[in-house]
Amino acid sequence: MNYVEALQKRYSVKKFDKDKKIPAEILNDILEAGKLSASSLGLQPYRMIVVESDEMKEKLIPTFYNPSQISTCSHLVVIITKKKIDETYIGNYFNHISETREISLENLQPFKKSIDFYMTLNSDEEMLHWNEKQGYLVLANLMFAAALEKVDTCPMEGFKPEEISEILEIDNETEKVTVTLALGYRAEDDIFQNFKKVRKPNERLFKFI
């Protein structure tokens, strides 16, 4: 299956087959695709919690306005973004670059200064918005990789972030639950899989100049 066929088959699943679990090796490849997502300045101001236990999914069900996917999915990925990027985070990032690429921190100073300057240009609210947009790039990569692996997904924003944070022990002062992604295999009786995909025609969507 090529990627266009995979995306044609993809839809936001409303009900998964609760008895079908994603094999570990396939799940790990999908998560690796998320890890390899583009990230502005390479900062990756996010992390992911992968919920796989039925016990934890049960606890999270009441935090979603439409819990059908949570109660039936194989795994739930919770994408959490940082509210601020502080000096400690940036310092750790450059230490990691230095170790990975075997470059001295001194040689990385011009790049670090450019990041430090960029951080001064935006308010805390603007930085959170910037960080969350990067989290959505991760979401897109996860969904694309899952489609290629013939794993079904449903991205979800309809939840109570404070309640999720409490259950997953996320510090609301420093992080925010941005979006979630349910993964699994579609149930045979999910009627939405039979609906034709509705998208704008090319002449209304694309303009070549």
Image: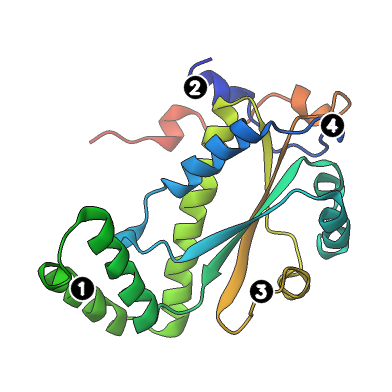
- In this rendering, which labeled residue sits more in front, label 2 or label 4? 4
Q: Are marks 1 and 3 in contact (CB under 8 Å)?
A: no
Measured in 3D between alpha carbons, the distance from the residue under mark 2 to the one under mark 1, in whole angstroms, is 39 Å
User: Which residue occupies 17% across, 68% down?
Assistant: 111
N-term mark: 3 or 2: 2
- What residue did someone put label 1 on? 112
Q: Which of the two discs, 2 and 1, sits closer to the camera? A: 1
Regarding residue 89, the answer to whether it shows in the image is yes
Q: Going 24% across and 73% down the picture, which residue do you hit?
A: 115
Q: Could you tell me which residue is drawn at 49 percent across and 46 percent down?
A: 34
Residue 60 sits in quarter: bottom right
Rendered image: mark on residue 17: 4
The amino acid sitting under disc 2 is Val
Instruction: Name the residue type under label 1.
Output: Lys
Residue bearing the label numbered 2: 4
Q: Secondary structure at mark 3?
A: loop
